[in-house]
Amino acid sequence: MSKEDVKKDDTYKLILETAKSLFFAEGKFNATTQEIADAAGVNRTLINYYFRSRNALIDLVFKEAMAEEEKQQKIIVMSSLPLREKLEKFIDFSFQTAKEYPYMEMYMVTHMNQQNIHEFKTREQVELLPFVFENIQAEMDKGNIEPMEPIQFLLNFISLVSFPISMRLLLQKGLNISDAEFERILDDRKNVILKTLFKN
């Protein structure tokens, strides 16, 4: 790869990471092409050069975020760890991402609502579900969690993890919680979730 190609590749990544930071870390969902360019320290025409349009850039940021989440989900689900440890790792990943990008979940839900949601359910996600349900059922059979439909257990888990992340702004405002206090709550929340879902 020539120096010019390397420079182009670096500029492409810089614009992409800047847009990701504006959307997910700062919550500037309506950031204009000029604002993205200014934050990245590049000429606005380079965004059209690399990504064709603001919408194409937004779609790429969204798809890359989805792909990274799916990758981590697959690594955790397909590991040989017991279900409780898998859930611990998923919580760690979710809360660490939420600390780095506090607006990511809100952005992704908003983006999905504006698009055709069926576009975002991949074959890999569907194929992982039976394996997840088997893990859950095995723990129920051992008496470690209350008997219920595995899908109900999964919904409980997702709700306990995602609700405080996606509702962060409203929760902080309504409950008068500072950023530092909310971070502490997230740090403590893993044990709360696991104690809620598991008998021991």
Image: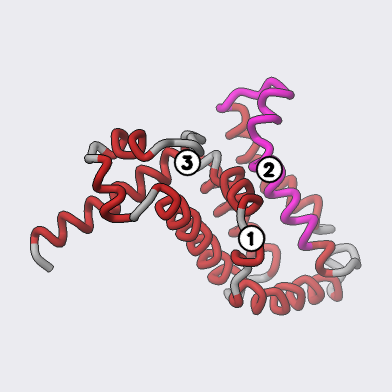
Question: Going by the image, does 20 lie left or right of 3?
Answer: right
Task: Give the residue drawn at x 29%, y 33%.
Answer: 38
Question: Going by the image, does 39 lie left or right of 25?
Answer: left
Residue position for label 2: 189
- Relative depth, front residue between 50 and 104: 50
Q: Amino acid at mark 1?
A: Asn
Image vertical order of residue 173 relative to residue 92, above or below: above
Quarter the N terminus occupies: bottom left
Picture colour scheme: secondary structure
Disc 1 secondary structure class: loop
The secondary structure that dominates the magenta segment is helix
Q: Picture coordinates of residue 116 (x, y %)? A: 64, 60
Q: Dot 3: within a 10 Å radius of its alpha carbon, few (fewer than 14), some, or many (20 or more) residues?
A: many
**What is the distance, in whole Å, between disc 3 and disc 1 at their CAs?**
20 Å
Disc 2 secondary structure class: helix
Residue position for label 1: 116
Residue position for label 3: 23
Q: Earlier in the sequence, mark 3 or mark 2?
A: 3
Q: Earlier in the sequence, mark 2 or mark 1?
A: 1
Task: Give the residue drawn at x 51%, y 35%.
Answer: 27
What is the span of residues highlighted in magenta in the rendered image?
Answer: 154-180
**What is the distance, in whole Å, between disc 3 and disc 2 at their CAs?**
25 Å
Q: Earlier in the sequence, mark 3 or mark 1?
A: 3
Quarter the C terminus occupies: bottom right
